[in-house]
């Protein structure tokens, strides 16, 4: 099987210094400000982005511990397969957040709803276009009974790399 190497296009700046205490979803981050600092060589790619109200950020969970296929997510007490969660300790530690776009100034994209740790490597920015999605979710699996808790939930550190020297890989949210 082929492998793929990706290079960050920038860094996310937020008020969240570490995974523990960080909102686990943009819905819990509310108006928390953030800035996507896009590296200068990628800044021309921001042309016309400011015409959108929301953007999708794709990033690396760079502070997550090793991958786990079974996890106990923040919103439940039982184990679930990692692919039925948004937990960060994944085989490919990719995070995704839909955030409100405030403005673009040069190579800086100002956001609201920042739920990622400061210094998170940014892989891509895409405009959020609801009409492009294939309808809304009809079933929410195990999350159906817990969805209302997402706004108040905060990272408790369970997915962060340990202080015992485990290799850091992949921010820390679910």
Image: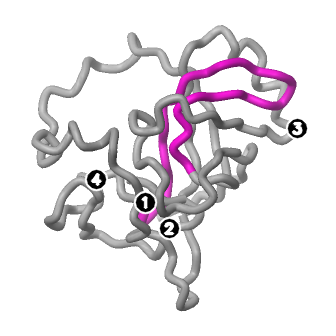
58 vs 85, left or right, is right
Horizontal and vertical percent position of residue 131: 39, 10
Task: Work out whether mark 3 precedes mark 1 in sequence or the reverse, and give the earlier one.
Answer: 3
Span highlighted in magenta in the image: 88-116
Residue 27 figure quarter = top left
Q: What's the distance in space between the residues labelled 2 and 4, CA to CA?
A: 15 Å
Q: What's the distance in space between the residues labelled 4 and 1, CA to CA?
A: 9 Å
Please tell me which residue is depicted at 36% across the width and 58% down the height of the picture. 87
Pair 3/4: label in front: 4
Q: What's the distance in space between the residues labelled 3 and 4, CA to CA?
A: 34 Å
Please tell me which residue is depicted at 30% across the width and 42% down the height of the picture. 150
Please tell me which residue is depicted at 33% across the width and 49% down the height of the picture. 153
Q: Which residue is mark 3?
A: 41
Task: Work out whether mark 2 precedes mark 1 in sequence or the reverse, and give the earlier one.
Answer: 2
Pair 2/3: label in front: 2
Taking 23 as reference, is 128 above or below it? above
Q: Which residue is mark 4?
A: 85
Task: Work out whether mark 2 precedes mark 4 in sequence or the reverse, and give the earlier one.
Answer: 2
Task: Work out whether mark 2 precedes mark 3 in sequence or the reverse, and give the earlier one.
Answer: 3
Does the CB distance between marks 3 and 1 fall below 8 Å?
A: no
146 vs 158, left or right, is left
Does the CB distance between marks 2 and 4 fall below 8 Å?
A: no
Pair 3/1: label in front: 1
Q: Which residue is mark 2?
A: 64
Does the CB distance between marks 2 and 1 fall below 8 Å?
A: yes
Q: Which residue is mark 1?
A: 88
**Circle 2 — which element?**
loop
Q: What's the distance in space between the residues labelled 2 and 1, CA to CA?
A: 6 Å
Horizontal and vertical percent position of residue 104: 76, 21
């Amino acid at each position: 099987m082929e492998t793929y190497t990706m290079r960050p296009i920038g860094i996310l700046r937020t008020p969240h210094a570490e995974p523990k205490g960080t909102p686990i979803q943009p819905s819990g981050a509310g108006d928390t400000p953030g800035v996507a600092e896009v590296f200068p060589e990628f800044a021309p790619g921001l042309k016309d982005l400011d015409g959108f109200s929301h953007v999708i950020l794709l990033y690396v969970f760079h502070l997550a511990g090793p991958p786990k296929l079974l996890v106990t997510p923040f919103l439940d007490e039982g184990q679930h397969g990692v692919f039925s969660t948004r937990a960060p300790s994944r085989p490919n530690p990719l995070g995704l957040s839909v955030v409100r776009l405030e403005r673009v100034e040069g190579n800086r994209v100002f956001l609201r709803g920042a739920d990622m740790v400061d210094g998170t490597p940014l892989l891509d920015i895409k405009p959020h276009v609801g009409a492009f999605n294939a309808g809304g979710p009809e079933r929410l699996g195990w999350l159906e009974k817990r969805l209302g808790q997402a706004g108040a939930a905060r990272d408790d550190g369970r997915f962060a790399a340990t202080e015992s020297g485990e290799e850091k890989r992949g921010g820390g949210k679910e």
